[in-house]
Image (spheres, rainbow, N blue to C red):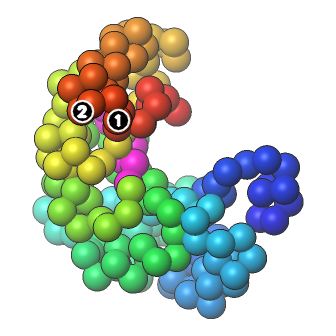
Amino acid sequence: ARRCGAGGGSHIIVTSWVFVDGKLNEERLDALVAAVGAHRIVLDLSCRRHPSDPTGPFHVVMDKWQRFTDCTITKDLLDRLAGRCAEFLVHGVDVEGKGCGIEADLVRQLGEWSSVPVTYAGGCRSLEDVEMVRHLGKGRVDVTIGSALDIFGGALAYADVVAWDAKEAGASGGASTGAPATA
């Protein structure tokens, strides 16, 4: 992690490394915070609902999104982790890369519960989905778009996303919700 920071990176995205045997390893996370500082850490919380409870909570998953951890996305979990990172990157893995629409419930929860910046990834296929993330996330959740963009073979024009972002920046007095989001 220190090598990445020394190489000029502003942040380090941390995924399954903070989970050992399906459990959040807070000692490991605290050691990383001590080494690089919370202000440089982006915690990737890839999540999905358990197949046995398709309307239940979102669980953090690891190991290529196949193994469920002991953590569910809750206000308590996000509060507990917020002091140890600068931002959350949250993947809705059941819709990731499918261009089938966003996990609306997850985006709503992130907008209500996260006290640090959060970027949502998964299923975004249109400007309507981008707008839905802005609305459901209460303007506090950014979105990343990947395979749905025309530059990656999808139908959503990158130029349209850039124009939408510029319009949002103008409407908010110049403070954009972030750089044009791509993956």
Q: Is residue 155 above or below residue 177?
A: above
Residue at x 69%, y 81% (from the top left corner): 34
* Residue 102 shown left or right of residue 165 in the figure: left
In the current view of this chain or complex, which residue is farthest to the front?
A: 173
Residue at x 52%, y 76% (from the top left corner): 84
Give the camera-side residue of 95 and 15. 15
Q: Is residue 155 visible?
A: no
Answer yes or no: do the residues labelled 2 and 1 have beta carbons within 8 Å?
A: yes
Q: Residues within 10 Å of mark 2 (few under 14, many from 20)?
A: few
Which residue lies under the disc numbered 2?
Answer: 172
Which residue lies under the disc numbered 1?
Answer: 175
* Residue numbers of the magenta segment: 118-124
Q: Is residue 83 magenta?
A: no
The amino acid at mark 2 is Ser
Q: Position of residue 28 (x, y in %)?
A: 65, 84
Q: Is residue 137 visible?
A: yes
Give the quadrant of residue 29.
bottom right
The amino acid at mark 1 is Ala
